Image (spheres, rainbow, N blue to C red):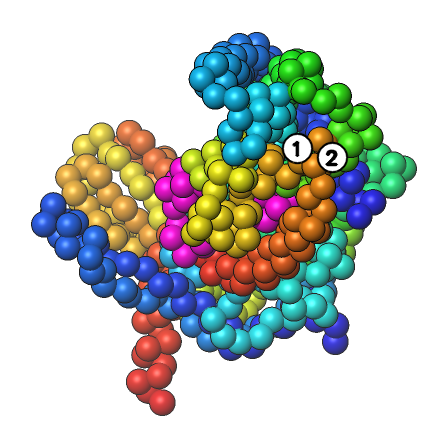
Amino acid sequence: MEYAITVKNLSKTYEYHKSEPGIKNTIKNLFHRKTEYIHAVNSISFDIKAGEFIGFIGPNGAGKTTTLKMLSGILYPSGGDITVLGHTPWKREKNLQKQFALVMGQKNQLWWDLTPLDSFELFREMYELHEKHFQKNLEYLSELLGIHDILNIQVRKLSLGQRMKCELAAALLHEPKLLFLDEPTIGLDVVSQKAIRDFLAIYNREKKATILLTSHYLEDIRRLCKRVMIIDLGKIIYDGSYINLIRKYADTKLLDISLRNQVEKSKLTRYGELISQEGNHIKIAVPRKKIIEMTSKILKELPIDDLSIHEKSMEKIVREIFEHETLNRQKT
Amino acid sequence: MKKSIKIFIQLLKLNFKNFTIYRTNFYISFVATLLWTTAYVIFIEVIFQHIDTLAGWDKGGMLMIMSFYYLFQNVGNVFFRDNFENFGDAMRQGQLDLVLTKPASLKMMLFFNKIRMDSLASFIINIFLFAYAIRELSEPISIEYLILGIIYTGISIIFFFYFLLFITTFTFWFQKNETLNTIIWNLLQIGRYPRQIYQDIAKIVFIFLIPLAMVASLPTEIALHLGSWKMALYFIGVTVIFGIISNIFFHYGLKQYSSAG
């Protein structure tokens, strides 16, 4: 079996200085600082097959980005081994760098005052792309991302969604076999999120690229990834199929409802599990499969003022998995 | 090497486009450099109204040192000064991340990324300064030796680049490099005077250990054919050693990079 990525006992420990508030402590810190250590990634192991599209999720500070940075050679690990396309990433061999791309939703690589096309020219030289190859890829990406008309507009004048599409195009000009995506849809509106998602799905299918995606939005993962890895406090707490994850831990959606007047509790429990009731404001957990049926029923039968549907939060899923794992360990 | 040259040309093109957007800076830079240079020329004129020579150098020689010093400083200002100065901020804000994943010379992408085209205005003034200095020389200068002096200024620039790289590498541990930068750019003033004025410990430190006193003085001596070939060879040797040590140290420092966010 061909693996694009192999990770064994990977760890990363950061050193930081603890500072306490107040002038007195600030002066004290000038002479003596307390050094502490944080284990951002704590001995994780996994393999990724070539062509897989994997969702790498977890709450803030769980270790997702640190892992991605070690996989792409930005950070040196404190321990463990990584093989990416047969190379050790932190050696930063050009041969490996030409085969992967990293896109970070919160960091730009396009020149702010120039047009996307100007930056693309620089990348063309970096990746030593022949003119024909470059034009062919640019045409393909512009078509798929719908960015033909904005390639000659200054980056700073583009919307966040347009900019992200151009960032993606810049990262993919050299047709990488492996793509690391760190929150590529962060801050985007629903339409732009969908456009990016659709693009990634097509790219993965057509180019057989291996993609590792981190995202806060479960919707991104649901639409794109068959396999999901969940990391929390530097440890992988779930590695398996998305379907299994949802079946086990997120089989319900949350209906957030404001009523025009108060309704009896017994009436509300008919639609699902009543999570909370504070005056006219209620929250009901409804099984994923029944969400459409129950929502239309509620709209018909209850005096609705406002209604919204939410996914179970990542934090909640992680907490449940954690509790589940702890319980399992206690049983054995 | 061919690839690096192509990337460098692209960087020049992008920076030139950037410059055309904010071209007012060009005029500001021109005026500022003109004022500084004029002030310094007046300073030398005033001094040489009272003395005939300084450490064996007459007014024409001093003006030549000054011309070579500005040439050296201008190249640094245009190509890498801003990049070194902003390195601490870039490092703390995690802006090195994407650069580290690119199949291109890391040092070029980090330290030649922002090229100050507006500072090119300084070169125009530099040419006038050279012309003035040559006119004031007591002996005529040969064009071949003048070119050799300019080539040697290139070695001074390479030496200074590696010196900056060595010092900047400490940023990986200190996190901030403002203080280091201030010290370095102030220390650089040592280079604007004849190296002969430095004696005892200053001579050992600034001519032999960290030859900052030679950056303009030595190219001038070469251009004026004053026979400093031993020192010229020594300076090349020190530059090579600094290059090797700085590269090793920089790559060791890179292991400490912890990024951000």
Q: Quadrant of residue B19?
A: top right
- Residue drawn at x 31%, y 85% as measured from the top left: A330
Relative vertical location of residue A115 with respect to residue A203 in this rendering, above or below:
above
Magenta stretch: residue B178 in it? Answer: yes
- The kind of residue on which mark 2 rests is His
Residue B141, given in percent of the width and then of the height, sits at 75, 24
Magenta stretch: residue A112 in it? Answer: no
Residue ID for mark 1: B220
Q: Residues within 10 Å of mark 1 (few under 14, many from 20)?
A: many
> What chain letter is assigned to the residue under label 1?
B
Residue B2, given in percent of the width and then of the height, sits at 83, 45
Residue ID for mark 2: B225
> What chain letter is assigned to the residue under label 2?
B
- Residue drawn at x 60%, y 71% as measured from the top left: A82
Cα–Cα span, label 2 and label 1:
8 Å
Closer to the chain start, of discs 2 and 1, is 1
Q: Which residues are magenta?
A: B157-184
Q: Outermost residue toward the right? A: A132
Residue A250, given in percent of the width and then of the height, sits at 42, 59
Relative vertical location of residue A313 with respect to residue A105 in this rendering, above or below:
below
Residue B107, given in percent of the width and then of the height, sits at 63, 47
